[in-house]
Image (cartoon, rainbow, N blue to C red):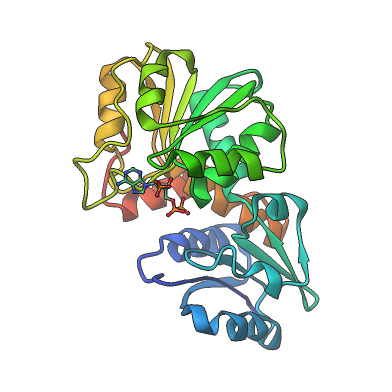
């Protein structure tokens, strides 16, 4: 009998995960089916119990459940606990174990796509929400030399740094302060939703002071090339869009469920096809 997998979220109908994972199951000859499950906040507890009752082999968890799901699981992996968010659950013989593959997925995509080693790099994160938290932790684990965080609300950036379980050189800045210091960084990452469809004319940070060859990464993948990434390219930056993070978080989850790391190039092609575009 095929194993059942899925994603729990709200909204979830637009998720690209089912088509990406189902293709990987088919390609690898694994008997698995992946579905999108719309779960409202008040039903999360029952949905998690249902995973056990129905013998569902594994799920992804997405907005708005990544933090709320933690107390409902039997075990939380160390990194997920320290990030404070779970995006992947494995059902191991009736025990539900929570992991976070978002942060590690981002770092792996960044390293492989831009051919960069994070170790020793000076990084600026734009934004201080849930996505920033996971990426901050994973970058620190990959031994960046410093990670500064800038945010519209500076106090949220201060809080992210204070609450982080890792100790690394870090400072919090307002957006304007960061814009002035931009030339200090080798890697600049947008973790906010600024520039996301349909607000495609918005940009999160002025790139006026950007140095040539800086790596500029945007976790947004709709549009595939945000206005901000276009501006970065014009400034001579090496750019990366959010498809890589999405694909690698999925590939790492797939590996946790099946023990097999899937073909990420194939996953990437499928996701880009679904987004109806050509990669920038
Ligand atoms: P996620 O969990 O997906 O990261 P989030 O927790 O809502 O989402 O975080 C959103 C981030 O984007 C925050 O850093 C937020 O800044 P504030 O802390 O000031 O709210 C940032 N953000 C969202 N909309 C923004 C906007 N229009 N301009 C600047 N920053 C914005």
Residue 79 spot, x, y in % from top left: 72, 49
Residue found at x 53% / y 25%: 123
Q: Quadrant of residue 133?
A: top right
The residue under the point 42% across, 44% down is 243
In this view of the protein, can residue 212 be seen by the observer? Answer: yes
User: What is the quadrant of residue 72 in the picture?
Assistant: bottom right
Question: Residue at the location (51% across, 83% down)?
Answer: 42
Q: Nearer the viewer, residue 108 or 31?
A: 108
**Residue pushed farthest front?**
155
Q: Quadrant of the N terminus?
A: bottom right
Residue at 41 percent of width and 24 percent of height: 178
The quarter of the picture where the C terminus appears is top left
Vertical order, 96 against 42 (above or below): above
Asked whether residue 105 is in view, the answer is: no
Task: Residue 240: give x, y in percent of width and height.
Answer: 41, 32
Q: Position of residue 17 (x, y in %)?
A: 47, 61
Residue 242 horizontal/vertical position (percent): 42, 42
Q: Is residue 17 left or right of residue 171?
A: left
Instruction: Check the image and report above or below for 130 versus 10.
Output: above
In the visual, does 89 lie left or right of 148?
right
Residue 75 left/right relative to 178: right
| Residue sitting nearer the eye, 101 or 169 | 169
Q: Quadrant of residue 224?
A: top left
Q: How many marks?
A: 0
* In front of the other: 126 or 215: 126
The relative height of residue 158 versus residue 28 in the rendered view (above or below) is: above
Q: Residue furthest left?
A: 201
């Amino acid at each position: 009998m095929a194993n059942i997998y899925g994603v729990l979220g709200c909204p979830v109908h637009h998720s690209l995960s089912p088509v990406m994972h189902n293709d990987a199951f088919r390609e690898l000859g694994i008997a698995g089916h992946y579905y999108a499950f719309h779960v409202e906040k008040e039903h999360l507890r029952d949905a998690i119990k249902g995973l056990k009752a129905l013998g569902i082999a594994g799920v992804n968890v997405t907005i708005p459940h990544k933090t709320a799901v933690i107390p409902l699981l039997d075990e939380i992996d160390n990194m997920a606990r320290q990030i404070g968010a779970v995006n992947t659950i494995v059902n191991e013989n009736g025990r539900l174990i929570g992991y976070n593959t978002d942060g590690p997925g981002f770092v792996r995509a960044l390293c492989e796509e831009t051919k960069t080693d994070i170790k020793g790099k000076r990084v600026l994160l734009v934004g201080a929400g849930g996505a920033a938290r996971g990426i901050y932790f994973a970058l620190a684990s990959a031994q960046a030399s410093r990670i500064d965080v800038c945010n519209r609300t500076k106090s949220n950036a201060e809080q992210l740094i204070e609450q982080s379980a890792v100790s690394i050189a870090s400072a919090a800045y307002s957006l304007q302060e960061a814009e002035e210091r931009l030339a200090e960084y080798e890697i600049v990452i947008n973790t906010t939703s600024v520039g996301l469809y349909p607000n495609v004319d918005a940009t999160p940070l002025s790139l006026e002071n950007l140095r040539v060859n800086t790596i500029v990464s945007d976790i947004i993948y709709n549009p595939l090339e945000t206005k901000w990434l276009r501006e970065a390219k014009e400034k001579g930056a090496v750019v990366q869009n959010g498809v890589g993070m999405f694909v690698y978080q999925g590939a790492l989850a797939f590996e946790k469920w099946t023990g097999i790391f899937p073909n990420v190039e194939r996953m990437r092609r499928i996701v880009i096809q679904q987004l109806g575009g050509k990669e920038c």
